Amino acid sequence: MAKIHPTAIVDPGAEIADDAEIGAYCVVEGDTVIGPGSVLRPHVVIRRYTRLGRGNHLDPFVVLGGEPQDLKFDPTTVSWLRIGDDNVFREGVTISRATGDGLETVVGSRTYWMAYSHAGHNATVEDDCILVNCAAVAGHAVVHRRTILSAHVGVHQFCWVGEGVMTQGGTGISMHAPPFTIIANVSRVVGLNAIGLKRNRDLTDEDRAQVRQAFRITYRSGLTVSAALAEMDRQQHWGAAAGRFRDFVRRVLEAEKPYARGLCPLRLRSRAD
């Protein structure tokens, strides 16, 4: 039987796993699911239409599944927040459910959300991402797996952040950030995330070399983005990692409004650098 503190308020319509823990003064609304092994520390709020997988840990004052911060939102909408397994949500994290009937905000598995980080309605944050204190992902944005959003990073709505991206603290991302890069300032690529590539055990040395080649073609060759994509298409020997870099660039070029935001450009070094 679930361990529920006597001061917690849990709606009878909530589905609570037998080994879940609900701490003091928590509020769990109806039409929710709290998966096996999940732990809610005191003062957590789980709003209606939230689905939590197994092994999630929530610190005080986390609010999951809150109504979208969208002036057009109709509170009668049935939309969802779906969360995977083994995630950590530190103090004050907030994630909104989706705008639009039947639509979802999605969080993968093994993510780590530091204090006061946020994801808006219809956003997607994939597996193994880290959001550092006060990082914010706007509505309809996508943060792909293994990405790190440093403190006070803001991702604009309808933007895609590719897998394995590393960001400088305070960065603003208002364009699409390609995989395996470092992003700083406002939507500026400053280089490859070499440390992230090295630490990614799913990649071989050949994969890493091919990703470097894709980066050079895109950012160091002097070609337009369209011409760089054509050149990458000629690299038939590339494996999956470089292929994902190429496919990301293709998707950016083919994007239509409101996703037609362009590819983050290279930051040009000044004499002060």
Image (cartoon, rainbow, N blue to C red):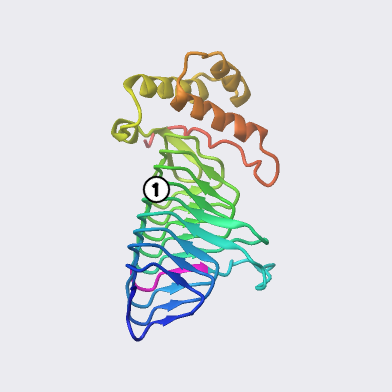
Question: Residue sitting at 44 percent across and 49 percent down?
Answer: 171
- The answer, for residue 78, to whether it is visible in the render is yes
Question: Residue sitting at 56 percent across and 43 percent down?
Answer: 175
236 lies left or right of 271? right
The part of the image, by quadrant, that contains residue 190 is top left
Judging by the rendered image, the residue that carries numbered circle 1 is 129
- Pinpoint residue 148: horizontal percent, then vertical percent: 38, 46
Compare residues 89 and 22 and report the one nearer the observer: 22
Q: Name the kind of residue labelled 1 in the image.
A: Cys
115 shown above or below 207: below
Magenta range = 59-65
- The answer, for residue 270, to whether it is visible in the render is no
Residue 99 shown in magenta: no
- Pinpoint residue 180: horizontal percent, then vertical percent: 42, 34
Residue 64 shown in magenta: yes
- Pinpoint residue 117: horizontal percent, then vertical percent: 42, 61
Q: If the image is split into quadrants, where does the N terminus sit?
A: bottom left
Disc 1 element:
loop
Compare residues 25 and 157 and report the one nearer the observer: 25
Question: Residue sitting at 70 percent across and 40 percent down?
Answer: 256
Compare residues 251 and 194 and report the one nearer the observer: 251
Q: Residues within 10 Å of mark 1 (few under 14, many from 20)?
A: many
130 shown above or below 213: below
- Pinpoint residue 251: horizontal percent, then vertical percent: 61, 33
Q: If the image is split into quadrants, where does the C terminus sit?
A: top left
